[in-house]
Image (cartoon, rainbow, N blue to C red):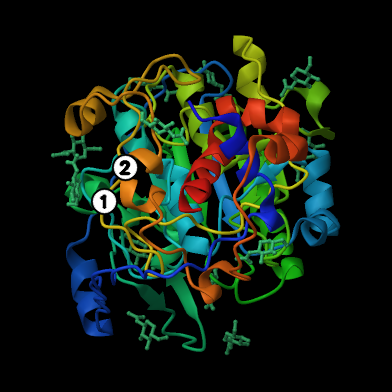
Amino acid sequence: MYSSSLLAFALTGANVVLGASSASYASRPPFSTIAPSLSQVVAAEATASALSPTSNVSGKGFDRIIQIWLENTDYEKAFEDPNLQALAKQGISLTNYWGVTHPSEPNYAASVAGDYFGMENDDFISIAANVSTVVDLLDTKGISWGEYQESLPYAGYTGFNFTNQQNTSNNDYVRKHNPLILFDSVANNATRLSLIKNFTSFYSDLAAKTLPQWSFITPNMTNDGHDTTITFAASWAKTFLTPLLNNTYLMNNTLIILSFDEVETYTAQNKVFTILLGGAIPDSAKGTTDNTFYTHYSTLSTVEMNWGLPSLGRWDCGANVLQVVANKTGYTNQVVDTTNLYLNVSYPGPLSDKAYIPTWPAPNTNAKCVAGNGVLGGIVSTWGKSDGTYNYTNVFPSVAAGVASTPTASASGTAVKSGTPTGSAAAGATSSGAASLNAVNVGAGVAALVAAFL
Ligand SMILES: *[C@@H]1O[C@H](CO)[C@@H](O)[C@H](O)[C@H]1NC(C)=O
Ligand SMILES: *[C@@H]1O[C@H](CO)[C@@H](O)[C@H](O)[C@H]1NC(C)=O
Ligand SMILES: *[C@@H]1O[C@H](CO)[C@@H](O)[C@H](O)[C@H]1NC(C)=O
Ligand SMILES: *[C@@H]1O[C@H](CO)[C@@H](O)[C@H](O)[C@H]1NC(C)=O
Ligand SMILES: *[C@@H]1O[C@H](CO)[C@@H](O)[C@H](O)[C@H]1NC(C)=O
Ligand SMILES: *[C@@H]1O[C@H](CO)[C@@H](O)[C@H](O)[C@H]1NC(C)=O
Ligand SMILES: *[C@@H]1O[C@H](CO)[C@@H](O)[C@H](O)[C@H]1NC(C)=O
Ligand SMILES: *[C@@H]1O[C@H](CO)[C@@H](O)[C@H](O)[C@H]1NC(C)=O
Ligand SMILES: *[C@@H]1O[C@H](CO)[C@@H](O)[C@H](O)[C@H]1NC(C)=O
Ligand SMILES: *[C@@H]1O[C@H](CO)[C@@H](O)[C@H](O)[C@H]1NC(C)=O
Ligand SMILES: *[C@@H]1O[C@H](CO)[C@@H](O)[C@H](O)[C@H]1NC(C)=O
Ligand SMILES: *[C@@H]1O[C@H](CO)[C@@H](O)[C@H](O)[C@H]1NC(C)=O
């Protein structure tokens, strides 16, 4: 799908410095910034409804998946935390799992949609209704889903933030950490809004045994470490999870992914410490490490393979699948040389405000994807049959032709053009990684897109 030279080029990370060429981007149209008043929030709460549908569609590697994200912590700091170490002993440590860019919001968006569409900010973003997410895939088999967002004032709240009225010194809830609410395909649907709930609902769903099969849990800004420290967040995580890990209802063939949205140091590789826990982890694997290359997109490809679902046709399509499922299906993951991989800068796109390009990229609607089920029919009918090349050279010919400039220095760090990639230089940098990323697709995204700039 992608040429190796472009892929490899993108993998050269530090050397892939975006060109500081002449033309500039158009301004991104402003987004709404509805910040409801407290009285409006209270009024809306009175009519909001929370739903808790259940299902029990069995999967190849697990019957339930729960993702919990903490915030902004470098790999080593997380790895060394004693509470996370204690949790790791009860599960599998992923030592090569990556965030896909900076800052927070694009990572959350990517985890449910398989792309971040150029986003490099934490703005009040609403993503076009024709962009599908994992919930469209889950719905094809009636697999129940939901989110638990701590300190969300009521189910389906769409505001930018919510501050605890008992202690107004901090924002408790922030929209940028709520992956599904960012998508109009979710936010314009009342049923879907009622599945985006808070921790009050988590505990009532647990007690009533009405937890969904797919869920995403976001602690508030205190508990996730954003406004505190890794020590605080890890302690919260251990305290939160310890009783849950002994709950036979909750743990029944459940996979918990405890991860981070991104690392804190932007010049570091964006590899985030991640722990797999729960009843779906075989006893023989507890306390082990897994050095397979994964990204946030792997959570999508894993769900797709686990339940035999179609793909979104975006960067989920070729992403490595967690071994807990791959082992059961005989799927062989790609080996990726990450020596010079950073995943620390966003490519341009329709959600970028520094490198804004108005066109929404089409998914690859022809691909079979790693789970082998092709792309969701509704996506194919919306976006049309593509020729199998999901790349910005295709979608944004003007960028490829060098008409548009690259992000500004503030967007890209040191924005200095270091030269045009050549096949041999690229191959020299990452010969094995190049070939494998071609299939893995993830780094490929960054690769082709960054390369398209130059
Ligand atoms: C993008 O797609 C076009 C047209 O299908 C193809 O010619 C080009 O080589 C592709 N670019 C990359 C980077 O794969
Ligand atoms: C499985 O689903 C069926 C049909 O929805 C339901 O009757 C049953 O209670 C469910 N079992 C569990 C364990 O959730
Ligand atoms: C959680 O959401 C429920 C249902 O929308 C609401 O009644 C409740 O007040 C919320 N709890 C907190 C702590 O915000
Ligand atoms: C959102 O955050 C702003 C700034 O911190 C604060 O003034 C406002 O009250 C918050 N909104 C809500 C609904 O909590
Ligand atoms: C309010 O929250 C801040 C930040 O989390 C914390 O430092 C402070 O102790 C809290 N105050 C009270 C009265 O709980
Ligand atoms: C609204 O969401 C529900 C639950 O995900 C889904 O079944 C339904 O098809 C959606 N409706 C529309 C019009 O998209
Ligand atoms: C975050 O949630 C906890 C409950 O788990 C709550 O006690 C705390 O007040 C919230 N954070 C802040 C800053 O208020
Ligand atoms: C949880 O279960 C494990 C064994 O499955 C047991 O060793 C441990 O004591 C239990 N912890 C609690 C708090 O019940
Ligand atoms: C676990 O799930 C299976 C399949 O749904 C069910 O048969 C079994 O009773 C469940 N066990 C517990 C302890 O809930
Ligand atoms: C990404 O990391 C490289 C290597 O450390 C660094 O040169 C570059 O400035 C970083 N980019 C950003 C946006 O921080
Ligand atoms: C997957 O298979 C490998 C090789 O047999 C094994 O080492 C690993 O523990 C397995 N992982 C899981 C989660 O089953
Ligand atoms: C998707 O929606 C965006 C924004 O409304 C629009 O610009 C674009 O043309 C749509 N694409 C397709 C294939 O419908």
The residue that mark 2 highlights is 395
Q: Is residue 270 visible?
A: no
Residue 205 is situated, as x and y percent measured from the top left of the image, at 42, 45
- Side of 23 where 216 appears, left or right: right
The picture places residue 206, in percent across and down from the top left corner, at 48, 43
Closer-to-camera residue (118/304): 118
Identified at 34% across, 63% down, the residue is: 356
Q: Nearer the viewer, residue 119 or 188?
A: 119
Contact check, label 2 and label 1, Cβ < 8 Å: yes
Q: Which residue is drawn at 27% across and 79% down?
A: 35
Per the rendering, the mark at residue 359 is 1
Query: Which quadrant of the structure image shows residue 81?
Result: bottom right
Residue lying at 72% horizontally and 41% vertically, measured from the top left: 425
Q: Characterize the local packing of mark 2: few (<14), some (14-19) or many (20 or more) Cα atoms within 10 angstroms.
A: some
Q: Could you tell me if residue 45 is visible in this image?
A: yes
Q: In which quarter of the image is ligand 8?
A: top right
Q: Assign a secondary structure to mark 2.
A: helix
Disc 1, ligand 12: is the CB inside 8 Å? yes
* Amino acid at the residue labelled 1: Thr
Horizontal and vertical percent position of residue 361: 32, 43
Residue 317 or 152: which is nearer the viewer?
Answer: 317
